[in-house]
Image: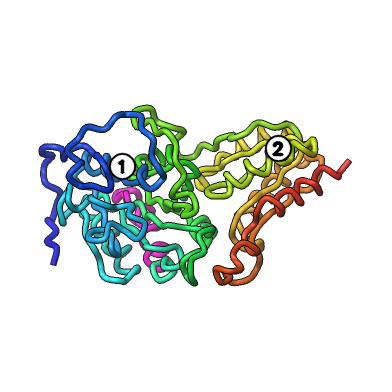
Amino acid sequence: MTQIIDRPAAQGDAPEPWGSILTPAAAQAPVPAVTELTMVQAINRALRDAMAADERVLVFGEDVATLGGVFRVTDGLTESFGAERCFDTPLAESAIIGIAVGFAIRGFVPVPEIQFDGFSYPAFDQIASHLAKYRMRTHGDIDMPVTVRIPSFGGIGAVEHHSESTETYWLHTAGLKVVVPSTPSDAYWLLRESISSPDPVIYLEPKRRYWAREAVDTTTPALPIGRAAVRRNGSDVTVITYGGLVATALSAAELAEDRGWSMEVVDLRSLNPLDFDTVADSVRRTGRAVVMHEGPRTLGFGAELAARISEELFYDLEAPVLRATGFDTPYPPARLEKLWLPGVDRLLDCVERAMEQP
């Protein structure tokens, strides 16, 4: 059984800098500040850098230590930081979040992993009843610096309970920050900032983007939590989305050019806090808005965005706010996944309807 000390020890020598996530021995080699990384590697490096900077940071979950995680996101962390800093837990999601709350009360900075999005439901009571409430319950005397990492959403042809869009549950739970990276750079910096936050953060990792690759600068912070990014400028319609669907929206924008439509793509990055100012500025310029998300249509995050845009920007709109979403059914078997998920065609259908308005 892993022995956990009662309180974090005094800061000692920092662990060796991060090297290759595939070869633990390579962790002795220096790493350039700017390097090309997949999203998996970017998240791994963010965890390593956070653990090296603060010995209170703990990583734990199902198969995160010996196996290095199902997607190898935590590969080599136990070898580098020891079994007291990165360790496996029983298959009990409620217990994983429960001990994270206990660790935070004792002064640690927990980063638990829920192995798949559909596995987070057994932990819902601990998240909603305790993790999200502790700071208010104690009048701000006790922080909850807990970052819950959850591989999320679809697009990989997984089996039942392995592809879910859980963001609306967390967004409706006051007291939680909710972030969704779409690029390796955002994955690195959003995770570093999440771990540094005194508030609990639900960090949703789009599984379909795990193998996306780009140059990541680990010395120059990207946009912080609470800021959206305009990934493509346009003049006719604003597409608002996040996570794995940002790439889908960018692909649709290329095809839209052939029909003479100029699409602006806004990547929310942070769902709570929400950067509505960036959304509003874009919609005021284009006069049209389409919200895109993977989850079911009814009461999805797109409904909240559509309502707020209609309420606050009514006189700036040239057409109703439209939604390109999943269907109001349970997530389908892998062979039907492509028919269920909103894709380029479903998005362009909405854009066409918006552009038909006078």
Q: Is residue 201 left or right of residue 5?
A: right
For the C terminus, the quadrant is top right
Could you say where residue 262 lies in the image, as x and y percent from the top left? 74, 34
Residue 157 vertical placement versus 34 (above, below): below
Magenta-colored stretch includes residue 144: yes
The quarter of the displayed image where residue 69 is located: bottom left
Q: Nearer the viewer, residue 9 or 38?
A: 38
Instruction: Write down the residue under mark 1.
Output: 45
Q: Marks 2 and 1: CB-CB under 8 Å?
A: no
Indicate the secondary structure of the residue bearing disc 2.
Answer: strand
The quarter of the displayed image where residue 103 is located: bottom left
Asked whether residue 96 is in view, the answer is yes
Could you say where residue 283 lies in the image, as x and y percent from the top left? 70, 37
Span shown in magenta: 124-146
Identity of the residue drawn at 48% across and 70% down:
159
Could you say where residue 156 lies in the image, as x and y percent from the top left? 50, 59
Name the amino acid, label 2: Met
Indicate the secondary structure of the residue bearing disc 1.
Answer: helix
Instruction: Write down the residue under mark 2.
Output: 263
Identity of the residue drawn at 66% across and 49% down:
291
